[in-house]
Amino acid sequence: MAFSRREFLKWSVGGAILATGLPRLANANVLPVGTCPNDPRSLSFYNLHTSERLSCRYFDGKEYVDNVLVELNHFCRDFRRNEVHVMDRKLFDLLYQIKLLLATDAEVELVSGYRSIATNNALRRHSSGVAKHSYHTKGQAIDFRLKGVALSDVHAAALALEQGGVGYYPRSNFVHIDTGPVRHWSQ
């Protein structure tokens, strides 16, 4: 049976994940087997609050694409106040790496990106799960899920990267990632 390169990578990376239970990566900047740091990187998004979609190549193989990062900043804006903030591009790399680990082309369903301090404070009044000094207010956090992918698998892949914070919110159906210190929690 002949496999295409894509099928081979999907089976080899997917099989390795299943066989090892998503082992921790030795180096946080290492991409999964079969990928190259100079490969172009693309993501597809759906914003659950605004119903907007965005498919983009944010890294062209040599550098980050500035005008695409501007689009991503707008896409991840605080929709409640229509405020845009610069998002940490490392978040997009984390999403890309999670998708590679899971060997999926699934759309990223955005629950929350940037949040203004006013929005964050309003959400804190209604939920104990919102941090006072949230990385969302710095453009360093994203709450998301991957369409059609088990949330527990997304969580496991995010933990395996050992980069930044990882929050698991199965009752609310999302995973939080941020570019702060390495830590994890569940609610």
Image (tube, grey):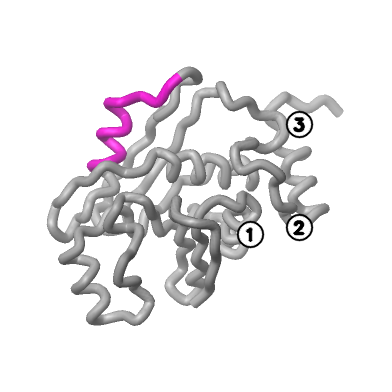
Three-letter code for the amino acid on which mark 1 is drawn: Ala
Q: Is residue 65 magenta?
A: yes
Residue 57 location (% of width, % of height): 41, 28
Q: Is residue 117 left or right of residue 72?
A: left
Q: Is residue 114 magenta?
A: no
Three-letter code for the amino acid on which mark 2 is drawn: Gly
- Identify the residue position indicated by label 3 in the image: 8
Q: Are marks 1 and 2 in contact (CB under 8 Å)?
A: yes
Numbered disc in front, either 3 or 2: 2
Residue 17 location (% of width, % of height): 74, 50
For the N terminus, the quadrant is top right
Q: Earlier in the sequence, mark 3 or mark 2?
A: 3
User: Residue 21: which numbered mark, if any?
Assistant: 2
- Identify the residue position indicated by label 1 in the image: 156
Q: CA distance from mark 1 to mark 3?
A: 22 Å
Which residue is drawn at the image coordinates 49% and 39% (left, top)?
93
What span is colored magenta in the figure? 63-74
